[in-house]
Image: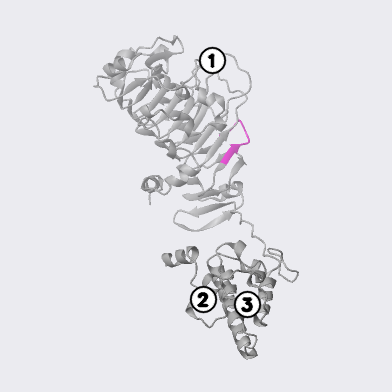
Amino acid sequence: MISLVRSVCDEPPPAIRQLNPEIPPWLAGIVEKLLAKDPVDRFQSAAEVAAVLSQGSTGSRQPAKTLGFERSATAAVDVAEEAPSRLVTARRQWLAAGALLVVGGLILAEAIGLTSLREFLSEEPNVPRPHDPPPPPVPSPVPQPEEILVFGPRGGKPRVFQTLAQAIPLAKPDDVIEIRQNGVIPVHPMRLDGRPLTIRAGQGFRPVLTSDREDSPLISTDSRLVLEGLVLRMKPAANERVGGETMGPAWRDAPPVDLGLAIVSRDAPLYLANCRIVQTPSQTPSRGRMVGISCIYLDGSPECELRNCLLLSPLRNLIGWNCPPGGRLTIQNVVGSSHGVVEALFSEGSASLHLKGNTLLAGSGVRVWLPSESRSDVLTIQSSENVFSVGMLLTCSPVDPEALQFEPAAHLPAMMTWHDRRDLFSKRTGFLEFRSRAAGSEPPVLGSLRQWDDYWGKPDAGSRQALLPPNLSYTHTNIPKTALDDPKDTVPGDFRLTDEWADFGADLDRVGPGEAYDRWRKTPDYRAWTEKVSPTP
């Protein structure tokens, strides 16, 4: 079939009189002209074809050139040599046959793209005739409906709402709220107490939830909460600068919920995937060292996991954790740029912190508030394949310095353990310091990776220390430069490492809401995540 089409387009057609010598030369010439490869060589209007047909049918002796074509060598016969004595009937028969050949030639030429029937049949090509119907209107793209869908725990037909404010009060325990809206959605502080919920972005949507108040958290709950594919944008609080320390004896009893926290979870599991939390710096001038509370506050939450998130908070810690016995905090494939990463307070029992495949820029990495009495196995930290561009990796402070009954540097390895494997640290990173409100910050106890490994009594686990590129650095004030520039415009790609260190840190293509979240939802990893965070039947 392809070879046939190529021959029609590229090779001249066989002379029609070779197939049937009885066809008059003038008619054969018309057909040859209709099938010319070059449009310039064809008839330019239907009127011209009609005139030539009329002359041929009446036996005109006009030279062939004036009829609009030249005869080929095999068909070069002067029209004047045509016998005028041919029967009228025969002429009419040939005229009818010629008309059929002309129509057949037009159809063939149209089929192979050599001409256009509309241009051939009109003396003014591409000009609509008065009686032609108007062209059909081009349909406008159908806008994707923006709505809030609420699914029951077993799926089924969803309930439909126009706004999130309508859906939240009517949601039932274990419902799934899917936001099919784009752009900024101002919301009042959402209290979800007593209702385990999942709130997620719809496929192809990127909702941005912003708080209209500074004195309350955007979301607070005492039940299991799953957030997926959302942007939470917090306003800078008027009293963003906080004097003194952020945690201590009064922190558990009076949680600081008056500075525009993003999320507060009390005594309940919290799971975040592919979310983006942005706390823009306050424009209010402040004096002294800038210290903030946390974007996410876990008050006794037994389990919390952050996956594929982008967290930007130059004046705050990412997570404040009041650890319950057996509590577990997992941070995986997260990009964070903040004042601090995790600040943890332990009252009793033990807990575990798991850091895997993250890219973290901060003034401090993990800060632990120690009890007054020496205990064993307060905290276990598992760390692997992370990038730490932090001023100090681990800071330990006593909850009550005056009541402290042990020497922290000597007893710390019995109270907690830190296992790291293939982590990448900045050359500027210090590894361990002790700090108290009474004595202030003391010189780092451990200033190098080798000292750090020796302190914990572990062999080389493949961790490295290197000079990281400028996009992964922090300023002298311990506030990451990447977050200070403009957190609203910061994207995961801003944290990309050079090829030499590409195997460390977060997989940036899977971080954040939008397309990254939509891709992740199609993977087996997401199905495993869903099974983990779904309510137990």
* Residue 119 on image: x %, y %: 65, 66
Q: Nearer the viewer, mark 1 or mark 3?
A: 3
Of residue 27 and residue 471, the one placed in the foreground of this image is: 27
Mark 3 → mark 2, Cα distance in angstroms: 17 Å
What amino acid is labelled 1 in the image?
Arg
Residue drawn at point x = 60 percent, y = 27 percent: 237
Q: Which mark is residue 496?
A: none
Q: Quadrant of residue 289?
A: top right
* Residue 401 on image: x %, y %: 41, 13
Marked residue nearer the N-terminal end (3 or 2): 2
Judge left or right: residue 40 versus residue 276: right
Dots 3, 2 in contact, CB < 8 A: no
Dots 1, 3 in contact, CB < 8 A: no
* Residue 38 on image: x %, y %: 57, 62
* SS state under label 2: helix
Residue drawn at point x = 63 percent, y = 87 percent: 92
Q: Which mark is residue 79?
A: 3
The answer to if 216 sits in the magenta stretch is yes
Task: Specify start and end residues of the magenta stretch as a single range.
Answer: 208-217
Few, some or many C-alpha atoms within 10 Å of disc 2 (few <14, some 14-19, many ≥20)? some
Q: Quadrant of residue 325?
A: top left
Few, some or many C-alpha atoms within 10 Å of disc 1 (few <14, some 14-19, many ≥20)? few
Residue annotated with mark 1: 289
Marked residue nearer the N-terminal end (1 or 3): 3
Residue annotated with mark 2: 16
Mark 1 → mark 3, Cα distance in angstroms: 106 Å
